[in-house]
Every structure is written in structure tokens, then in C-alpha cells.
């Protein structure tokens, strides 16, 4: 199994910044893509951004230019740097990882979520 543990959420004023971290542990050998999703009250969970093992990134249009996903493969950790935060960014943020194994295919793993609240 794979365990994902997030940290770094909290309360921030509009225009402020936060950095989320997610450390992966367990059977992580075949993990390739890691990233972040978020879910606001009454809304569906949505992709925020992801990064492949080779460093290719993908972002939701709503966060392009403001958020950056990065990873440290030596530490098995993925980060989400959020700048110019807006009240609309308020949500629970979930770390996500995809592992692919022969005869099993893709497996998706999730962290427990961390609350980000943007408010004055």
C-alpha cells in the first residue's frame, strides 16, 4: 500500500501564499504521477495540478500562473506552492498519487486532505 500524508494547510488572507507538502511512504516504487486535487463545499473534487516522474506538469486553468506543483523524488514528496490566493481557492486539498503495476494496472491513492481557507 501507499500512504500519503499532507501538511501545510491553514488560514490565509486574500493575496497571500501557502505551500502544501505531501510525503509518500510504503510501496512507492512504481508511483509515477503525483499531484493535488481540491474539493470545496457543495462541489465536486477537481484537479488542481499534477506532475509526472519526469517533471511534466499539468494545471487547472483556474490556477495557472498562481500555483506551482513540484516534487523531490529523493524525499518522495510533492509540493503545491499557492500564490495570489483568492477566496474561491478555499477547499480541502487532497494529495493524489498513481501507481502502475504489471497485471494490476493503475492504482490511485489519496491523502486525508488538508483545509485551506482564504479569508480576510
Image (cartoon, helix red, strand yellow):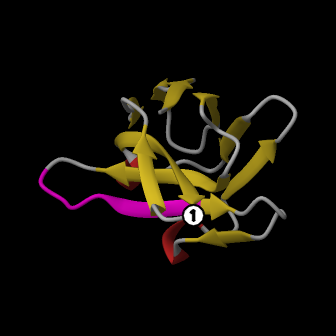
How many numbered marks, from 0 up? 1
Image: 96 above or below 44: above
Question: Image point 74% across, 34% down: which residue?
Answer: 76
- From the viewer's side, name the closer residue of 16 and 66: 66
Where does the image place residue 13, in percent across and percent down from the top left? Answer: 50, 33
The single residue placed furthest to the left in the displayed view is 42
The reply to whether the magenta stretch includes residue 86 is: no
Instruction: Judge left or right: residue 30 versus residue 3.
Output: right
Residue 51's quadrant in the figure? bottom right
User: Picture coordinates of residue 5 (x, y %)?
Assistant: 52, 24
Q: Is residue 79 above or below residue 60?
A: above
Q: Residue at x 50, y 60 (%)?
A: 48
Question: Would residue 64 be visible to someone looking at this image?
Answer: yes
Quarter of the figure that contains the C terminus? top left
- Residue placed most toward the observer, 23 or 47: 23
Question: Camera-side residue: 8 or 28?
Answer: 28
Locate residue 16: give its quadrant.
Answer: top right
User: In the visual, does 66 lie left or right of 71?
Assistant: left
SS for dot 1: loop
Q: Which residue is label 1 attached to?
A: 102
Residue 120 visible here: no
The image position of residue 104, as x and y in percent, is 45, 61
Magenta stretch bounds: 42-49
Q: Residue at x 57, y 60 (%)?
A: 100
Residue count near mark 1 (Cα–Cα under 10 Å), binned few <14, some 14–19, many ≥20: few
Residue 8 image offset from top left, x and y in percent: 57, 23
Left or right placement of residue 56 versus residue 118 in this view: right
Rendered image quadrant of residue 52: bottom right
Residue farthest front in this picture: 103
| In the image, residue 27 above or below residue 7 | below
Amino acid at each position: 500500500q501507499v500512504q500519503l500524508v499532507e501538511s501545510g494547510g491553514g488560514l490565509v488572507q486574500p493575496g497571500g501564499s501557502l505551500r502544501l507538502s505531501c510525503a509518500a511512504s510504503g510501496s512507492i516504487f512504481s508511483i509515477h504521477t503525483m499531484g493535488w486535487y481540491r474539493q470545496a463545499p457543495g462541489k465536486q473534487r477537481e484537479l488542481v495540478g499534477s506532475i509526472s516522474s519526469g517533471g511534466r506538469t499539468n494545471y487547472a486553468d483556474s490556477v495557472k500562473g498562481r500555483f506551482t506543483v513540484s516534487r523531490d523524488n529523493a524525499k518522495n514528496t510533492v509540493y503545491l506552492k499557492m500564490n495570489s490566493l483568492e477566496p474561491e481557492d478555499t477547499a480541502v486539498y487532497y494529495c493524489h498519487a498513481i501507481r502502475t503495476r504489471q497485471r494490476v494496472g493503475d492504482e490511485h491513492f489519496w491523502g486525508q486532505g488538508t483545509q485551506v481557507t482564504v479569508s480576510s
